[in-house]
């Protein structure tokens, strides 16, 4: 069929992902080809020391994203989007969305960026003998209990952002296993929350006298390929203001951005890995076996089908880098030079290749918020140099690109060097890699291994969740996700692999020595800059 007929006959899948700075919708055919894209830009807010998005922003953002995609379909193909083969929703992992039994929000939405859960995370880690990161939903919930917040007794549903939007569209309290692994520890054999740890949590909070148990208020866990309800009439009306979209469309389990990143890079089988670099930066390595011990720097999560996966997650990625690029854009405008943002990024990123392998002695920390890997619970943005540092535009850009990978590199070192984890391929995706051959080259230096970036890398997690939706309705009986991706989606796709340059590897190692040594400066800045 031609594309118009494919769309009219509903031989499509739609993925919507709520990222940190952009909500993106991608419509694909069942071969994974992108047919249309919708976009809504947004940004989180720091309100009463909580990183959050208001419910109004969340709702409007999803609706505007879908409207943008619907209009793109009508403009490109002359088709009114009515029927879709399957839909999937993805969002930033972790965080805390709290609802009462009427479905009303009863506490501010807390994103993954919040690090106000140290006591809870520490106590749960000790109780479970399992690392509970500060941003996990379980840590947020227990911290709210420890802080005596009134809303906890009225809890009826605690969800991640993806599970919340899925509930809005289907009425079903369901979550994909990969995103569930950002709420609470998962038993990969049972494909559910770890029963023993659930019991421990319930006994821990029993003295508070709440009417609920953890299993009552957390969403049901499903794996990729399992149907997670259908789009209701109310859901269709919420999504499409024109009323054209039909109800009854199957929906796959909602996933987190880690799971969709794995899918989008075909990194769902053991010995595969991927690095997603954008507002946050995280590396995912699918394991053949569990790690030998608990590391506070490493999250243990799962793939969308439940394989155990080690995650080095840095809260901070390219936000400060983007701010520097915006500053140069402002300067160009002042000088009367009109610049295209994409061209500006491309030129500045490319200029960094002329810098010194060790960034000329420059040092930067893009800590907009606290950083779990380095055990720093607040953020301060820092750029440092000595009198004899080589201060140039190339080195300035290079150090901000390097530091976007700095924290995640610490976690990867644990996996590669301490645990001797074997990885056959590492895939890169996200905005960090959009300028060809730059971010990819620096990641290869950081991991001292070849890095591949697919031509589809810029489509990111929205494409990944679209593939999971397609897998729901178009896979063969008993076809595994990794086989579906290998044989159906990635078979004809092309990409480029960059091997590490020896001088880059040595330069990145030198930069990391300075990065670790300078963490005391970051801690001092937090104490001194309290305004």
Image (tube, helix red, strand yellow):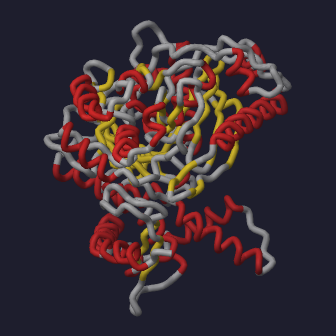
Name the residue: 32% across, 53% down. Answer: 118
Q: Say which of 139 and 301 sits in front.
A: 139
Find residue 231 and report its image quarter: top right
Numbered-mark total: 0
Q: Nearer the viewer, residue 146 or 170?
A: 146
Q: Is residue 354 above or below residue 3?
A: below
Is there any visible trace of residue 496 in the rendered image?
A: no
Q: Quadrant of the N terminus?
A: top right
Q: Residue furthest left?
A: 292
Does the rendering let one see residue 321? yes
- Viewer-proximal residue among 488 and 340: 340
In the rendered structure, the answer to whether residue 439 lies left or right of residue 341 reads: left
Q: Residue sitting at 55 percent across and 22 percent down?
A: 469
Could you tell me residue 287's position as x and y percent? Answer: 26, 35
* Image height of 125 relative to 481, above or below: below
Q: Tell me the residue at 57%/56% (across/down).
A: 47
- Which of the pair 144/289 is nearer the observer? 144
Q: Position of residue 442 (x, y in %)?
A: 41, 61
Residue appearing at x 17%, y 46% in the figure: 419
Q: Position of residue 261 (x, y in %)?
A: 47, 38
Q: Residue furthest top?
A: 477
Q: Which of the 4 quarters of the picture holds residue 13?
A: top right
Q: Position of residue 282 (x, y in %)?
A: 40, 48
Q: Is residue 363 left or right of residue 100?
A: left
The correct choice, above or below, for 489 with respect to 265 in the image is above
């Amino acid at each position: 069929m031609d594309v118009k007929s494919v769309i009219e006959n509903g031989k499509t899948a739609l993925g919507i992902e709520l990222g940190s700075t952009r909500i993106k919708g991608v419509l694909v055919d069942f071969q994974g080809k992108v047919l249309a894209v919708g976009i809504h830009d947004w940004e989180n807010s720091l309100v009463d020391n909580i990183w959050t998005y208001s419910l109004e922003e969340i709702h409007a953002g999803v609706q505007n994203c879908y409207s943008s995609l619907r209009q793109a379909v009508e403009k490109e193909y002359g088709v009114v989007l009515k029927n879709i083969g399957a839909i999937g929703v993805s969002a930033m992992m972790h965080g805390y969305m709290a609802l009462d039994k009427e479905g009303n929000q009863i506490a501010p939405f807390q994103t993954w960026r919040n690090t106000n859960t140290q006591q809870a995370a520490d106590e749960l880690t000790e109780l479970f003998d399992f690392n509970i990161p500060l941003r996990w939903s379980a840590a947020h919930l227990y911290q709210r209990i420890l802080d005596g917040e009134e809303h906890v007794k009225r809890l009826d549903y605690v969800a991640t952002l993806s599970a919340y939007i899925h509930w809005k569209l289907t009425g079903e309290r369901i979550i994909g296993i990969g995103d569930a692994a950002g709420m609470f520890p998962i038993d990969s054999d049972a494909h559910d929350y770890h029963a023993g740890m659930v019991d421990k949590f319930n006994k821990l909070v029993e003295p508070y006298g709440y009417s609920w148990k953890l299993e009552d208020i957390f969403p049901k866990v499903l794996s990729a390929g399992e149907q997670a309800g259908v789009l209701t009439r109310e859901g269709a009306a919420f999504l499409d203001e024109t009323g054209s979209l039909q109800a009854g469309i199957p929906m796959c389990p909602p996933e987190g951005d880690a799971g969709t990143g794995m899918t989008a890079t075909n990194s769902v089988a053991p010995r595969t890995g991927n690095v997603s670099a954008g507002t946050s930066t995280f590396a995912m390595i699918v394991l053949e076996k569990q790690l030998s011990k608990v590391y506070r720097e490493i999250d243990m999560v799962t793939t969308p089908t439940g394989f155990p996966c080690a995650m080095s997650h840095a809260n901070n990625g390219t936000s400060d880098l983007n701010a520097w690029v915006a500053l140069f854009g402002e300067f160009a405008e002042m000088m009367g030079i009109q610049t295209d943002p994409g061209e500006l990024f491309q030129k500045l990123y490319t200029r960094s290749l002329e810098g010194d392998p060790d960034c000329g002695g420059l040092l930067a920390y893009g800590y907009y918020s606290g950083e779990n890997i380095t055990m720093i619970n607040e953020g301060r943005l820092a750029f440092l140099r000595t009198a004899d540092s080589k201060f140039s535009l190339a080195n300035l850009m290079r150090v901000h690109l390097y530091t976007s990978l700095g924290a995640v590199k610490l976690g990867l070192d644990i996996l590669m060097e301490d645990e001797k984890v074997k990885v056959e391929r590492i895939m890169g995706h996200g905005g960090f890699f959009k300028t060809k051959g730059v971010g990819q080259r620096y990641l290869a230096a950081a991991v001292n291994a070849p890095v591949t970036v697919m031509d589809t890398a810029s489509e990111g997690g929205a494409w990944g969740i679209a593939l999971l939706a397609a897998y729901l309705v178009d896979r063969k009986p008993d076809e595994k996700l990794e086989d579906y991706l290998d044989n159906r989606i990635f078979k004809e796709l092309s990409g480029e692999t960059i091997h590490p340059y020896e001088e880059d590897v040595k330069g990145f190692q030198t930069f990391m020595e300075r990065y670790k040594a300078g963490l005391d400066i970051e801690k001092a800045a937090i104490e001194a800059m309290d305004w």
